[in-house]
Image (cartoon, rainbow, N blue to C red):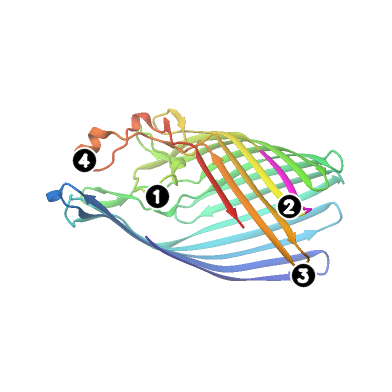
Amino acid sequence: FNSNVGVSGFSHTYLFKRNAYLKTNIGISGQYNNIITNKIDSSFNNTNFIIPEYRQETQNIRYTFNSTFNKKFNSRDFFNIGINLELYKSSFVDSINNLFGKNTFITLRNYKGSTSLLRSFSQWQHKFSDNFLFNIGINYQYFLLNQSSAIEPRFGIKYNINQKQSISLGSGLHSQIQPAYIYFASEMQNGIRQETNKNLDFTKSSHIVASYENNFSANFRLKTEIYYQYIYNAPVKNYPNTFSALNLGADFFSPNISNLVSKGNGYNYGIEITLEKFYNKGYYFLFTTSLFESKYKASDNITRNTAFNGNYVFNLLGGKEIKIKDRHTFSVDLRGVFSGGKRYSPINLEESISQKTEVRDLTKAYQFQYSDYFRLDIKP
């Protein structure tokens, strides 16, 4: 695996006379990946034999332009409006070895081209009082590849109970395009390779979040959030199957999944708790915990765990600084993570032996769970 990344850009701010300014950013970023995957057949004349399996070469260049106008009308009203244009220039070529032990590769995807994503937004913030804040806004997205669009209204309120405590509530719609390799997945139809996923819609979700924050001392903060997210228009197979794009990213490869339609759904809900000790008297710490449930429904209309449904995550970050005489200090930082394991589908051993490659038992998709994950890092 070989990867190279580059980023460049600049920013400009123009100040108007009456409590307003315009901020504009222009940037370019690029990424190049080259993946070579081989198998080892230990049964070939009782010696290890390297068999080419998969090849991938991708190049993505993204040009971005965004500009935001911000206006403060008075002490209670603030307004901003903006536009964001992203131009994607991509090359995605991959192939797989079709004959066991032979260097005969079949092309999976071979795309070279460009497309754009246009986003715009406006937002108004109003303070009914020093303790009551209200935000309302709307976002719009348009994807030039297939002319799909999304309108996303959002709102949020925050109420300060007193100088130390506050509550807030937010809700809205959010949309995102699919990974590029999903749009350009292909299959052979009547001897011609066809790209079957180009008309996929945005994956969309509806969120609601409620939170409580308590700065119960000068150096401590406690924050609790509960949330619910309903996801729809997720890519799934156009016939009964367990696949859903909501599980993408759980593995270290880009699957060539064709014949997808935007008809899947899912949901996430949970609670997050954060306890923070700001740096004071030579030490600090941040403890977060998340308890959650994550489910999806594919084209077979069965609700299952997503691959990411570990149910809990605990994080601890902290540090201590010790003075040694007047001119020297010794510091130590600690970071710990404990989380539930990802979900997986068990291996179908008989089919794997027959096909000489890994085959998962999708009748038990994501019914099993890996062991809990624990990691502790200490940096002196």
Mark 2 Cα within 10 Å, few/some/many (few <14, many 20+)? some
Residue at numbered disc 4: 355
Q: Are marks 4 and 3 in contact (CB under 8 Å)?
A: no
Question: Helix or strand or loop: what does disc 3 sit on?
Answer: strand
Q: Which image quarter is the N terminus in?
A: bottom left
Whether residue 111 is visible? no
Question: Helix or strand or loop: what does disc 2 sit on?
Answer: strand
Numbered disc in front, either 1 or 2: 2
Residue 260 x %, y %: 38, 42
Whether residue 266 is visible? yes
- For the residues labelled 3 and 2, the Cα–Cα distance comes to 40 Å
Type of amino acid at the residue the image marks with label 3 = Leu
Vertical side of 246 occupied by 281: above or below: below
Question: Helix or strand or loop: what does disc 4 sit on?
Answer: helix
The residue located at (42%, 48%) in the rendering is 199
Type of amino acid at the residue the image marks with label 2 = Tyr
Numbered disc in front, either 2 or 4: 2
Query: Which numbered tag is attached to residue 252?
Result: 1
Q: Earlier in the sequence, mark 3 or mark 1?
A: 3
Residue at numbered disc 3: 15
Residue 222 x %, y %: 74, 41
- For the residues labelled 4 and 3, the Cα–Cα distance comes to 66 Å
Type of amino acid at the residue the image marks with label 4 = Gln
> Which range of residues does the magenta coloring cover?
273-281
Viewer-closest of 346 and 365: 346
Residue at numbered disc 2: 283
133 to the left or right of 201: right
